[in-house]
Image (spheres, rainbow, N blue to C red):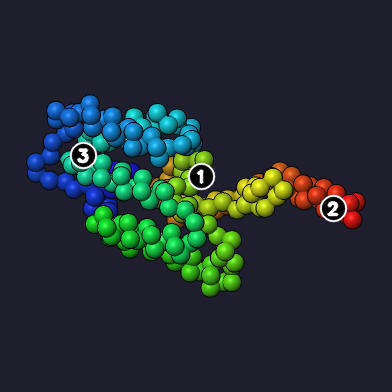
């Protein structure tokens, strides 16, 4: 998160860098940062527990040359994570929120391009929900992630998903990062959903 904040210009490096550990507000800053980050981490990601993730981010915070800017970045991330709904509306709200915070809103362009491609290919956009707080349960994703859901009698059932993982090849021993993306279907979930749908149809036929 800190690396992305630096790339977006939210955290700046300067000649008068003051480590957080040397300031008088260390304890208060740590508690505030943990509170903000904990709200954004709902479930374990990969094999790391939320506390381990928090510890790693806190170490990065202490090394930041401008920790106040980092906290601003966390606040912006929290605001973005609250955006969920119709694709066009969410993208526009994200752009507005970023612009208001002084961040270049063009970082939403990739998401906007994906939505345009889906619409251009005739995909039913009323079936697409954009949730900026959504995360897959594996830590190697580096970009856009998605989940496919099926309507069942019990509600929406996730039957597959995937995303972009440009750093996976190198992390598994490759010599360099490699652009990559993929997805998988959950066969058991699909079978369960179809069986549920079949049972519902049989009950309706018997009543008729």
Nearer to us in this view, 94 or 110: 94
Residue 11 percent coordinates (x, y): 22, 47
Residue at mark 3: 67
Nearer to us in this view, 56 or 155: 155
- What residue do we see at 41% from left, 48% from top? 81
Does any portion of residue 59 appear in the rendered image? no
Residue at mark 1: 136
Image label count: 3
Q: Earlier in the sequence, mark 2 or mark 1?
A: 1
Residue at the extreme front: 207
Q: Which of marks 3 and 2 is nearer the N terminus?
A: 3
For the residues marked 3 and 2, what is the alpha-carbon distance in whole angstroms? 61 Å
For the residues marked 2 and 1, what is the alpha-carbon distance in whole angstroms? 36 Å
Does any portion of residue 129 appear in the rendered image? yes
Relative to 117, is 64 above or below? above
In this rendering, which labeled residue sits more in front, label 3 or label 2? 2
Residue at mark 2: 204
Nearer to us in this view, 175 or 180: 180
Residue at the extreme top: 27
Relative to 60, is 133 above or below? below
Residue 13 percent coordinates (x, y): 16, 46
Residue 25 in the figure: left or right of residue 144:
left
Mark 3 packing: few (<14 Cα in 10 Å), some, or many (20+)?
Answer: many
Relative to 203, is 17 above or below? above
Q: In which quarter of the image is residue 53?
A: top left
């Amino acid at each position: 998160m800190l690396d992305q904040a630096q790339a977006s210009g939210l955290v700046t490096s300067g000649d008068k860098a003051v480590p957080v550990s040397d300031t008088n507000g260390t304890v208060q800053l740590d508690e505030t940062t943990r509170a903000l980050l904990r709200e954004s981490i709902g479930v374990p990601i990969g094999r790391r527990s939320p506390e381990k993730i928090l510890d790693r981010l806190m170490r990065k915070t202490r090394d930041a040359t401008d920790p106040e800017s980092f906290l601003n970045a966390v606040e912006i991330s929290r605001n973005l994570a609250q955006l969920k709904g119709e694709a066009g509306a969410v993208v526009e709200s994200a752009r507005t929120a970023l612009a208001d915070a002084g961040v270049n809103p063009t970082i939403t362009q990739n998401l906007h391009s994906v939505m345009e491609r889906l619409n251009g290919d005739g995909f039913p956009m009323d079936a697409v929900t954009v949730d900026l707080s959504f995360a897959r349960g594996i830590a190697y994703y580096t970009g856009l992630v998605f989940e496919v859901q099926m309507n069942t009698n019990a509600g929406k059932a996730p039957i597959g998903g995937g995303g972009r993982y440009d750093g996976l090849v190198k992390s598994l021993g490759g010599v360099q990062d490699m652009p990559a993306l993929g997805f998988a279907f959950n066969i058991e979930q699909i079978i369960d959903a179809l069986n549920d749908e079949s049972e519902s149809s049989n009950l309706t036929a018997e009543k008729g």
